[in-house]
Image: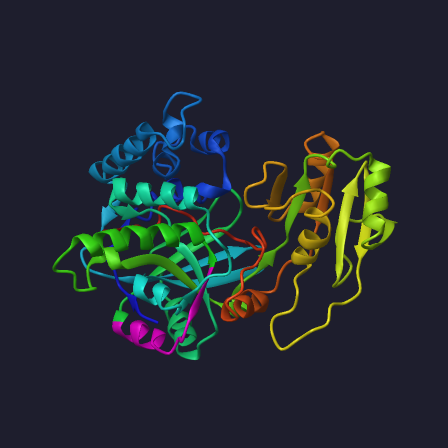
């Protein structure tokens, strides 16, 4: 693994709370507009620039990308975002309740992605790749970091622990209660050397952001007859976390209809596949179990444990997709189907109940969270996990560290 320091664009400490925003892809346009209301410094003016254009504007129109570039330039001219005077690395710590995770903010090389030193566990959609690639081109910058994970490394842990005893560059609590702190690493060479002991890393969140950065990097590589591999377009902004610190929450499903079946017909079909009983909770009580909510009732769906092999085990989400969502409800491709919705986060079970009870869905499924070991095992085996299998929390805030090309 190679990492490199970079000359970040970032807000001064007093503006960091106002600038920091949720990632572009966890909110829709209306939600982004509400979050940015009354805050001209919110980074959503750049990452979701349609919020400053007339209602109904296509988020992928030329006007939106132009608006994003204009806002980015305005933030720099007004001193909302200020460029560091020398390349640097950072430690970025997030604390949500009793859970804390500390990652290293650095750039990694697209060749390490191409050579499978940076591994994936999800497929990407071309339309989403193209959207973020155009955003990078218009800004000439990577506006949101990729969330990466590596197997714990004692040398990195020691550097991070020592640094966190000093005064942070910024330290604030976001409106959702998550505390965000960062320290600038003075000895970048020491950290870069420590990362040479990391044999591989894994994309936890941000597959489309990484794929888009690689797409732009390849374009510029092909167009540059003097390409050396050291140009900024070869490097992708990320935050690297040790695996032991990460928390994965469930990523649940809501299906909008019963595929032209009556509720009793649907339950009968489910009973052919799973052992089913009525329960009072939406939390699965163990492995080989999914909970289902329909008509104001929770059900426990169980199956016989799968035979384990030397490779990664079969995920609950895969069983649900292969045995129920596809053959019974007709959700053949959950990445593109308009009939399925994914709900993750800290209040996911309550959100399932609200969605079904309000008529926004006919049936919902609550799953256990995937283990981080499963994510790495699937990536190492060259396998792809079902879409929307993992929900990492807390999310990285955008706008705190920006890598320009």
At 81% from the left edge and 52% from the top edge, which residue is drawn?
300
Q: Position of residue 225 (x, y in %)?
A: 13, 58
Is 190 contained in the magenta span?
Answer: yes
Above or below for 110 versus 54: below
- Image quadrant in which you'd find residue 106: bottom left
Residue located 71% across and 34% down the image: 257
Whether 18 is drawn above or below 57: the answer is below
Colour style of the rendered protein structure: rainbow
**Magenta residues?**
189-203
List x then y, in percent, for residue 212.
Answer: 35, 50
Describe residue 149's horizontal placement relative to residue 74 as left or right: right
Q: Is residue 382 magenta?
A: no
Of residues 269 and 347, the one nearer the viewer is 269
- In front here: 387 or 236? 387
For residue 339, which quarter of the picture? top right
Up/down of 122 relative to 195, above or below: above
Image point 16% across, 61% down: which residue? 227
* Residue 216 spot, x, y in % from top left: 28, 50
Residue 401 in view (yes/no): no
- How far across and down, in percent of the image, does residue 259 sit? 73, 36
In screen coordinates, is 152 left or right of 317? left
Is residue 402 left or right of 343 when viewed as pictured? left
In the rendered structure, the answer to whether residue 69 lies left or right of residue 58 reads left
Q: In the rendered image, is residue 369 in sight?
A: yes
> Which residue in the rendered view is the most extreme toward the left?
226
Q: How many marks?
A: 0
Location of the N terminus by quadrant is bottom left
């Amino acid at each position: 693994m190679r990492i490199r320091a970079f000359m970040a664009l970032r807000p001064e400490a007093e503006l960091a709370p106002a600038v920091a925003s949720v990632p572009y892809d966890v909110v829709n346009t209306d939600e982004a507009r509400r979050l940015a209301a009354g805050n001209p410094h919110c980074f959503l003016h750049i990452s979701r620039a349609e919020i400053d254009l007339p209602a109904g504007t296509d988020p992928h129109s030329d006007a939106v990308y132009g608006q994003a570039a204009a806002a980015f330039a305005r933030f720099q001219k007004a001193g909302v975002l200020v460029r560091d005077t020398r390349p640097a690395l950072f430690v970025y710590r997030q604390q949500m309740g009793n859970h804390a995770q500390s990652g290293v903010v650095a750039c990694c090389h697209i060749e390490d992605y191409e050579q499978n030193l940076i591994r994936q566990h999800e497929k990407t959609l071309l339309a989403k790749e193209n959207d973020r690639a155009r955003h990078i081109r218009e800004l000439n910058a990577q506006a949101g970091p990729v969330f990466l994970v590596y197997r714990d490394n004692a040398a990195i842990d020691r550097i991070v622990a020592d640094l966190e005893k000093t005064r942070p560059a910024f330290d604030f609590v976001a409106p959702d209660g998550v505390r965000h702190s960062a320290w600038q690493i003075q000895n970048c060479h020491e950290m870069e050397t420590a990362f040479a002991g990391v044999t591989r890393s894994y994309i936890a969140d941000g597959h489309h952001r990484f794929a888009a950065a690689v797409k732009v990097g390849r374009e510029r590589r092909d167009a540059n007859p003097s390409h050396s591999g050291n140009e900024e377009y070869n490097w992708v902004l990320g935050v690297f976390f040790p695996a032991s610190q990460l928390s994965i929450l469930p990523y649940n499903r809501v299906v909008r209809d019963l595929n032209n079946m009556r509720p009793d017909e649907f339950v009968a079909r489910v009973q052919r596949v799973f052992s089913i009983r009525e329960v009072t909770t939406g939390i699965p009580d163990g492995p080989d179990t999914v909970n289902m909510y329909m008509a104001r009732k929770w059900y426990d769906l169980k199956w016989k444990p799968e035979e384990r092999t030397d490779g990664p085990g079969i995920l609950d989400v895969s069983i649900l997709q292969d045995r129920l969502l596809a053959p019974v409800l007709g959700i053949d491709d959950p990445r593109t189907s308009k009939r399925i919705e994914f709900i993750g986060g800290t209040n996911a079970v309550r959100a399932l109940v609200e969605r079904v009870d309000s008529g926004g869905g006919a049936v919902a499924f609550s799953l256990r969270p995937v283990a981080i070991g499963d994510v790495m095992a699937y990536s190492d085996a060259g396998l792809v996990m079902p879409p929307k299998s993992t929900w990492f929390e807390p999310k990285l805030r955008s706008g705190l560290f920006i890598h320009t090309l």
